[in-house]
Image: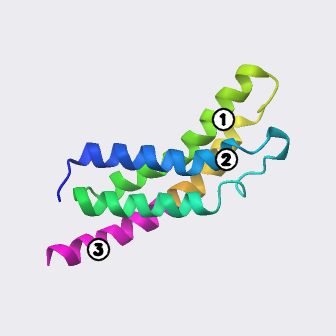
Amino acid sequence: MAMKKPTALALAFAGALLAVGVGYWAIPYSQLALPDDIVGWGLLAVAALAAVARVVSASGFWATTLAVGAAVPAAVLARVVMDTWSDPTSHNLWPFEIVLAAGPGFLASAVGALAGGVLASRRRA
């Protein structure tokens, strides 16, 4: 069940973006608290999607970690764009929000990519 690397990574990115974003986007702006708001099931999905992408496409560790992990700060950036569209005075510290989301996102993705690499090597052996 081999899949092309760009396709697998794009699907994993989209899935991770939705997994983290749906819950995060539903929180009212006045109650946001990063990174706590992104920690949970969404990050578990990021790790799982990174592992699956690595197994089905044989993509490399760094490519998988960066592609899937980037979905978490992308979800935060999408929220920033939408919120500032309606209220330009909101998210005045948005670069810090991106950094606070990137750490857990890339960490979860790296764990998943590492696990996927182990599974893929055992599958090939």
Q: Point out residue 17 in the picture as x, y percentages from the top left corner.
A: 51, 45
Amino acid beneath label 1: Arg
Dot 2, how many residues are within 10 Å of its Cα: few (below 14), some (14-19), or many (20+)? many
Q: Which residues are magenta?
A: 108-125
Residue tagged by mark 2?
Answer: 24
In the rendered structure, find residue 79 and report the number of the disc placed on it: 1
* Quadrant occupied by the N terminus: bottom left
Instruction: Please tell me which residue is depicted at 69% across the width and 43% down the height of the picture.
Output: 97
Q: Is 58 one of the magenta-colored residues? A: no
Instruction: Please tell me which residue is depicted at 75% across the width and 45% down the height of the picture.
Output: 27
Q: Is residue 33 left or right of residue 41?
A: right
**Mark closer to the observer (2, 3):** 2
Dot 3, how many residues are within 10 Å of its Cα: few (below 14), some (14-19), or many (20+)? some
Task: State the SS at label 1.
Answer: helix
In the rendered structure, find residue 119 and report the number of the disc placed on it: 3
Q: Point out residue 47 in the picture as x, y percentages from the top left corner.
A: 46, 63
Instruction: Please tell me which residue is depicted at 52% across the width and 45% down the height of the picture.
Output: 18
* Quadrant occupied by the C terminus: bottom left
Quarter of the image where one finds residue 48: bottom left
